[in-house]
Amino acid sequence: MTSILLRGRTLSFERWPQTIDDHSAWRYEEDGGVLIGDDRIVAAGAYADVEKQAGEAVRKIDHRPHLLLPGFIDAHAHFPQMQVIASYGAELLDWLNTYTFPEEKKFANAQHGRRIARLFLDEMVRHGTTTVVAYCSVHKASAEAFFAESHDRNMLNIAGKVMMDRNAPEGVLDTPQSGYDDTKALIKEWHGKGRQLYAITPRFAITSSPQQMEMAGALCREHPDLHMQTHLSENHAEIAFTQQLYPWSRDYTDVYEHYGLLGKKSLFGHCIHLSEREADALSNSGSVAVFCPTSNLFLGSGLFDYQRYRKRDKALRIAAATDVGGGTNYSMLRTMDEGYKVIALNGEKLNPFQSFWQITRGNAEALSAVERIGTLNEGTDADVVVLDANATPAMRLRMETVETLAQELFLLLTLGDDRAVREVYVAGRAAKTDMIAV
Ligand SMILES: [Zn+2]
């Protein structure tokens, strides 16, 4: 067994931090250690204690004075949209038709898919994200490209080929049968191979016919352990069009409910304009609402009411995500900075411990994966990010007046980006260094 011992200031969450002083919600060690054996965390805690458990042959890596946290988790992104990000001037449906669908056509070409998958996962690692829940294009080859690249890096990623059979141009359409067959074949080949996990991925109600929605429901019934991901209630024109296409439905959520797509492993991107009935339906089924602040602001979709959803009697499970390329940044730090502002516009605040909980343990819980990722707990996969709050001249200057961990974390959220990410360990391997070396 190869083992390494990381030293630095370690921070990992036990549960949701109620307030900025809720110290028992997290474990923080000023001089902390993380002992990694092969790809797992063997021990974490005070450095002096952890060091005693390390054998003679351990390789010691000193990251002091930097922070060591669990790797970030991005719960919703579109890997084929790297050349869509930063497209000007449209709302959701126009943005899809004008920029996104034409771009996704290119992913029929396996070589293109492999190139973009490589560059996409490079960006994830560069920004400290060790797990991403990704939409591929409609093409089976795009999912194969993504999983092959992810498997090579030994990353725990969750992805699926999108199913879409209408209201989009030729070249990005499947059929109910081919969407089902391709999904089945991909599950068989990739789900559970190494760290790869498959997500059944009907793009959204507008681009799937009722027949395809039936097929998506069948896939969920046949594979109840798999994730399901789609989009819900992002903008008003989308909601109105969905009601036209499914005139029998009580509301947008009812469409997914009808086809059996709600559940504990179901991830719904956006969920901005939900009625109380819809929020109840998501909550009752344990479904997850995915908050994508940079995307919601960029496309002018609306303000996700994070605190209302969290504090209501039937609370929603919430994840946070970039939603690249509707989102405007690959960084979960930038994402939570914009998230803070969206929540502020709703008259609430998210304290920095809550923000870091969300992009680590919180997202892992939302993905039902906290036994494996999202903490520095013993026995979990060794995905670790090393953060430097002095990464830029402006950060260094501001750090001169920072006195507490909470202030430092808030500075990282407000001014931090990929430059603050000094190293990233993926299953115990120094992935950022490796990437730069290649
Ligand atoms: Zn999306």
Image (spheres, helix red, strand yellow):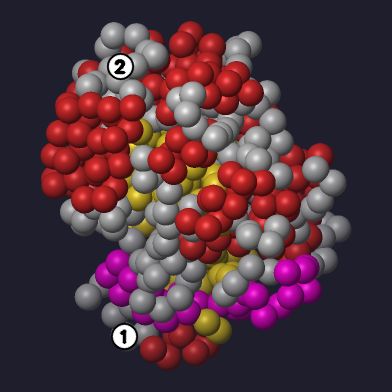
* Looking at the image, residue 377 lies above or below residue 395: below
Ranked by sequence position, the earlier of labels 1 and 2 is 1
Residue 90 location, quadrant: top right
Q: Position of residue 211 (x, y in %)?
A: 28, 28
Residue 39 location, quadrant: bottom left
Element at label 2: loop
Residue at label 1?
Answer: 56
Foreground residue, 106 or 65? 106
Which image quarter holds the C terminus? top left
> Which-is-in-front pick, marks 1 and 2?
2
Element at label 1: loop
Residue lying at 42% horizontally and 91% vertically, measured from the top left = 52
Position of 239 compared to 380: left or right? right
Asked whether residue 4 is in view, the answer is: no
Residue at label 2?
Answer: 172
* Looking at the image, residue 255 lies above or below residue 386: above
Q: Which residues are magenta?
A: 18-44
Residue lying at 67% horizontally and 80% vertically, measured from the top left = 24
Q: Position of residue 260 (x, y in %)?
A: 36, 45
